[in-house]
């Protein structure tokens, strides 16, 4: 069985306020489960969200860099 996290736990995991995961839920940008009146987010959904929004560093080539005047 997969671990389900509360909104508070997700906010702490992401390092944000509770408002951010609630907005993700409201905008249907993250998978969630309704357990009665409680909202839970699967741990894999949080991991998938982080992976999908991870930005890799750009590798700049020396010839493409501009010189400061």
Image (cartoon, rainbow, N blue to C red):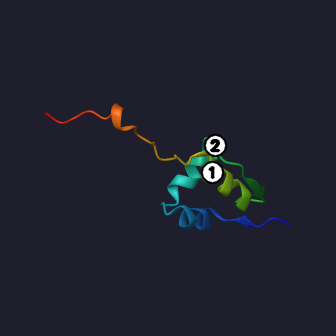
Secondary structure at numbered mark 1: helix
- Residue under the image location 59 percent in, 47 percent down: 24
Is 34 left, or right, of 59 in this rendering?
A: right
x 57%, y 66%: residue: 13
Which residue is painted at 60% across and 63% down in the image?
A: 10
Identify the secondary structure beneath mark 2.
loop
Label 1 to label 2: alpha-carbon separation: 14 Å
Q: Is residue 32 left or right of residue 27?
A: right
Residue 20 drawn at (x, y percent): 52, 53
21 and 2: which is toward the camera: 2
Q: Which quarter of the rendered picture does the C terminus lie within?
A: top left
Judge whether residue 21 can be spotted in this image. yes
Give the number of the disc on residue 31.
none
Residue 54 is situated, as x and y percent measured from the top left of the image, at 55, 49
Where does the image place residue 37, in percent across and percent down from the top left? 73, 59
Extreme front residue here? 63
Side of 17 relative to 45 (left or right): left
The residue that disc 1 covers is 51
* Label 2, residues with CA under 10 Å away: few <14, some 14-19, many ≥20: few
Disc 1 residue crowd, few under 14, some 14–19, many 20+, Cα 10 Å? few
Residue at figure coordinates x 26%, y 33% from the top left: 66
The percent coordinates of residue 60 (x first, y second) are 40, 39
Among the 4 quarters of the image, the one containing residue 33: bottom right
Compare residues 35 and 52 and report the one nearer the observer: 52
Would you say residue 38 is visible in this rendering? no
Residue at the disc numbered 2: 29
Which of the two discs, 1 and 2, sits closer to the camera?
A: 1
């Amino acid at each position: 069985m997969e671990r389900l996290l509360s909104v508070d736990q997700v906010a702490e995991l992401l390092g944000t306020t509770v408002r951010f995961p609630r907005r993700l839920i409201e905008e249907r940008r993250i998978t969630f489960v309704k357990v009665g009146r409680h909202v839970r987010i699967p741990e894999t959904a949080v991991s998938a969200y982080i992976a999908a929004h991870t930005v890799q560093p750009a590798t700049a080539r020396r010839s493409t860099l501009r010189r400061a005047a």
